[in-house]
Amino acid sequence: QVHLVESGGGLVQAGDSLKLSCAASGDTFSKYTVAWFRKAPGKERVFVGAVSWGGVRTNYPDSVKDRFTIARDNAKNAVYLQMNTLKADDTAVYYCAADERVAPSVNHPWAYDYWGQGTQVTVSS
């Protein structure tokens, strides 16, 4: 199994950029597809992107496709979520999740076995 810890959240203004990190420990990290989800108050957890185990394939929903980028550095056991042109609607707790059995096209939270504790991103308008 793998242990995940997110960092990098904070309070920013609309239009700003922010980079989140997901640090992994435990099992061989390069085996895992890693996804990012977010959960706003009163809403369900929503998929914001995923990256394949080797970092070659990514998948994003249309809502963030032109603004968010996921990259990974397996040598550092880390995955990053670069968020640009942030909007107030991006305010949420952001989670990274991992699973070695799924492809980055999988966007359901229940498909991912391992989760971090989340990091808060607040975008003021």
Image: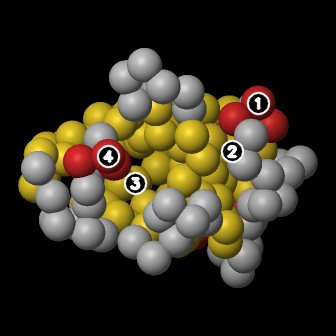
Which residue is the site of mark 1? 110
Horizontal side, residue 94 vs residue 123: left or right: right
Question: In the image, which is nearer the foreground, mark 4 or mark 1?
Answer: 4
Q: Residue at x 47, y 50 (%)?
A: 22
Name the N-terminal-most of marks 3 and 2: 3
Compared to 66, does 60 lie above or below? above
Could you tell me the amino acid type at mark 1?
Trp
Does any portion of residue 55 appear in the rendered image? Answer: yes
Horizontal side, residue 62 vs residue 117: left or right: right
Name the N-terminal-most of marks 3 and 4: 3
Name the N-terminal-most of marks 1 and 2: 2
Question: In the image, which is nearer the foreground, mark 1 or mark 2?
Answer: 1
Residue 21 tag number: 3
Residue 97 tag number: none
Element on which disc 1 rests: helix
Which residue is the site of mark 2? 98
Element on which disc 4 rests: helix
Q: Disc 4 versus disc 1: distance between alpha carbons?
A: 23 Å
Could you tell me the amino acid type at mark 4?
Asp
Q: Which corner quadrant of the image does residue 110 belong to?
A: top right
Name the N-terminal-most of marks 3 and 1: 3
Q: Residues within 10 Å of mark 2 (few under 14, many from 20)?
A: many
Horizontal side, residue 43 vs residue 30: left or right: left
